[in-house]
Image (spheres, rainbow, N blue to C red):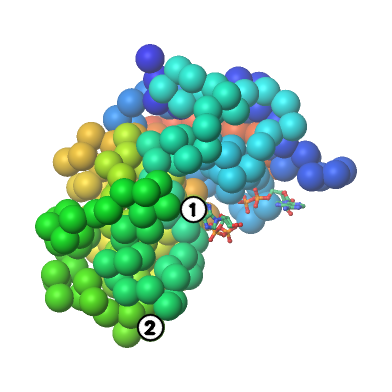
């Protein structure tokens, strides 16, 4: 079955209808970009998958199971999440930041695994002992990706992961994430307001407007303007 299914999903904040009538399936292995103007509901839709946000109506299935019926720690361990910006804890080293998810679950990440995760995001092993404020913005976001991958998730969710980076750094990290998606056999859902980035990285582009999916196309079809 599909990795993720939304069934007539809706979310309102008081009078604001952030997401309305979203039904779709994301097959395993797909790299999906969720694009649209600010306020169109992208982030809300994304966060219903790992239950940072609970929907007002409808349901979300992850690997065939209703996410609302699953214990949160178990669910979040199977779903990597990359924050928009400063997601690192400033008082913890790079290694401690990477290991935080497993540690909260009572597990220890071996030094070798930390090294492997750093290698996956193309960071030198000696960065493990650095504090976040001694890293560049691009390095920090790479640590954020390594942390999201620490528990070996099947699904990677990213909320404007490269938005705060300069264009060169953004392109390099985007390409690395695309390669990791393939190497690790992930299903990836990335929120971005950058259509060029979506067209470059994704297999499928979902366009949101006022809480609804208004286009669902391959990059090739979108470029052809159909
Ligand atoms: P996007 O990610 O596309 O920028 P969001 O999902 O963040 O869109 O927001 C969709 C709509 O919901 C917007 O109108 C936004 O102002 C509103 N919204 C988002 N989060 C909240 C919240 N916690 N409380 C009230 N309104 C919210
Ligand atoms: P934004 O809404 O600006 O994209 P983030 O993506 O950085 O903000 O954070 C989204 C939400 O995730 C925050 O409101 C925060 O409460 C929550 N959060 C913080 N730490 C964790 C964590 N370790 N795991 C899951 N959710 C978290």
Residue 128 visible in image: yes
Residue plotted at (37% across, 49% down): 106
Q: Quadrant of the N terminus?
A: top left
Tell me if residue 125 comes above or below residue 146 in the rendering: below
Vertical arrangement, residue 59 with respect to residue 206, above or below: above
Q: Are marks 2 and 1 in contact (CB under 8 Å)?
A: no
Under circle 2, the secondary element is helix
In the image, taking residue 77 as reference, residue 54 lies left or right, namely right
Secondary structure of residue under mark 1 = strand
Classify residue 132 as left or right of residue 116. right
Vertical placement of residue 75 versus 112, above or below: above
Extreme residue in the bottom direction: 134
Residue under the point 14% across and 70% down: 125
The mark lying in front, picked from 2 and 1, is 2
- Please rate how many residues cluster around mark 2, counting C-alpha atoms within 10 Å: few if below 14, some from 14 to 19, many from 20: few
Residue 34 pos. (x, y %): 50, 43
Q: Which residue shows up at 54% across the image and 22% down it?
A: 66
Q: Quadrant of residue 12?
A: top right
Residue at the right extreme, as displayed: 15
Image quarter for residue 59? top right
Q: Earlier in the sequence, mark 2 or mark 1?
A: 2
Q: Is residue 33 above or below residue 117?
A: above
Is ligand 2 within 8 Å of the beta carbon of the residue shown at mark 1?
yes
In percent of width and height, residue 186 lies at 29, 36
- Asked whether 219 or 94 is in front, the reply is 94
Q: CA distance from mark 2 to mark 1?
A: 22 Å
Indicate left or right for 181 with 89 as reference. left
Would residue 219 appear left or right of 40 to someone viewing this image?
Answer: left
Q: Quadrant of ligand 2?
A: bottom right
Residue 6 in view (yes/no) = no
* Label ID, residue 159: 1
Q: Which mark is residue 133?
A: 2
């Amino acid at each position: 079955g599909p990795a993720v299914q939304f069934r007539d999903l809706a979310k309102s904040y008081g009078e604001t209808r952030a997401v309305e009538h979203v039904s779709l399936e994301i097959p395993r292995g797909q790299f999906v970009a969720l694009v649209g103007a600010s306020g169109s509901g992208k982030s809300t839709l994304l966060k219903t998958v790992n239950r940072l946000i609970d929907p007002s109506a409808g349901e979300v299935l992850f690997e065939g199971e209703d996410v609302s019926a699953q214990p949160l720690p178990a669910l979040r361990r199977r779903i990597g999440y990359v924050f928009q910006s400063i997601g690192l804890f400033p008082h913890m080293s790079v290694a401690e930041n990477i290991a935080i998810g497993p540690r909260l679950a009572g597990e220890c990440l071996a030094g070798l695994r930390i090294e492997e995760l750093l290698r996956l995001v193309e960071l030198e092993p000696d960065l493990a002992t650095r504090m976040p404020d001694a890293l560049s913005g691009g390095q920090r976001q790479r640590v954020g990706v390594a942390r999201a991958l620490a528990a070996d998730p099947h699904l990677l969710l990213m909320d404007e992961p490269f938005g705060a980076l300069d264009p060169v750094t953004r392109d390099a990290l985007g390409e690395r994430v695309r390669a990791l998606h393939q190497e690790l056999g992930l299903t990836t859902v990335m929120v971005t307001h950058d259509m060029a980035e979506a067209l470059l990285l994704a297999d499928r582009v979902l366009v949101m407007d006022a809480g609804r999916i208004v286009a669902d196309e391959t990059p090739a079809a979108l470029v052809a303007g159909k």
